[in-house]
Image: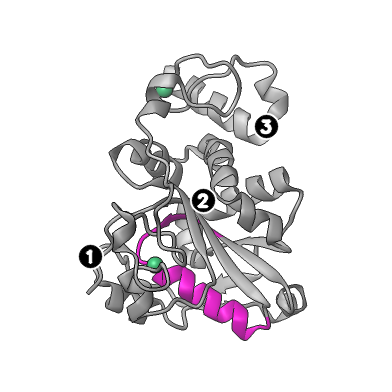
Amino acid sequence: MLLVRNRLGRGLRYAAGWAVDSVLPPECPICRTLTDGPHRLCVACFSGITFITAPHCLCCGLPFATPGEAGPHGTCLGCIRRPPRFNRARAALRYDEASQRLILPFKHGDRTEFAPVLAAMMARAGAGLLAEADALLPVPLHRRRLVSRRYNQAGLLAEQLARRAGCRWLPDALMRHRQTVQLGQLSAAARGEEVAGAFRVRPDRQSLIDGRRLLLIDDVMTSGATASACAAALLEAGAKSVDVLAAARVPFPGRG
Ligand SMILES: [Zn+2]
Ligand SMILES: [Zn+2]
């Protein structure tokens, strides 16, 4: 009964948004402690989160332990070896044990009420990118994975961010027409090969892409190979530029 009530409450919160927030007391989505306002973590959960700040790669946003890690143009080794097709990528959180308590239930556990919490953090980290974007769009799932998961977590983030920024968003302009394997154990080079050519712009959405400055939204960025493959498809369709904003960034992606 408690499980049903919790699920109903969570579903209601996302479906009815701020209307329900005014009825139910605001609570931390991780530990259920009551909070001062909606879409916030409690002090204990918030204090465990590591936000990504400078120094980081000026291109892909990879956090550096020290400024000395940067290459001659302020970029990381990965961006020097394999320059990505996007201009800049930024992420709000370091992908670690603390942020996984947000990301994993959101991605795999139907906890869609985490979307506005993560979007608020992303809006701060990507304020400059959001200000310059003509439109937002999510990294798409293949239709088979979308059917099994029932929602695209990146799409929920893009919707929330577009609503906050008053920016257009394009939920279905980009499609993943080839299903890719899980990239988890692959090297950076193998990731690039696996996702190359897996994305394309829907022909009937090309006019929405042409000449636009686009901001691609994702939940977790690892090597940047997926974002780069998406950017390649968008540029091919005539996009003026592509930046990337992710909720979290894996700090030490494989560089093989
Ligand atoms: Zn908490
Ligand atoms: Zn980089």
Q: Position of residue 72 (x, y in %)?
A: 37, 73
* Residue linked to disc 3: 17
Magenta span: 217-238
Q: Residue at x 47, y 76 (%)?
A: 229
Image quarter (top left, top right, bottom left or bottom right) of the N terminus: top left
Look at the image and say whether residue 221 sits in the magenta stretch.
yes
Image-quadrant location for residue 82: bottom left
Between 153 and 164, the one nearer to me in the picture: 164
C-alpha distance separating marks 3 and 2: 16 Å
The residue sitting at 53% across, 63% down in the picture is: 139
* Local secondary structure at mark 1: loop
The response on whether ligand 1 sits within 8 Å of label 2 is: no
Q: What residue type is disc 1 on?
A: Gln
| Mark 1 or 3, nearer chain start | 3
- The three-letter amino acid code for the residue at tag 2 is Gln
Q: Quadrant of residue 191?
A: bottom left
Q: Is residue 216 above or below residue 29?
A: below
Q: Which residue is mark 2?
A: 153
x, y (%) of residue 144? Answer: 47, 65
Which residue does the image show at 29% across and 78% down from the upper left?
189
* Residue 75, percent from left and from top: 39, 69
Disc 3 residue type (three-letter): Gly
Image location (x, y in percent) of residue 165: 71, 47
The residue that mark 1 highlights is 185
184 vs 43, nearest the viewer: 43
Q: Earlier in the sequence, mark 1 or mark 2?
A: 2
Disc 1 to disc 2, C-alpha distance: 22 Å
Please tell me which residue is depicted at 57% across the width and 66% down the height of the picture: 243
Between discs 3 and 2, the one toward the N terminus: 3
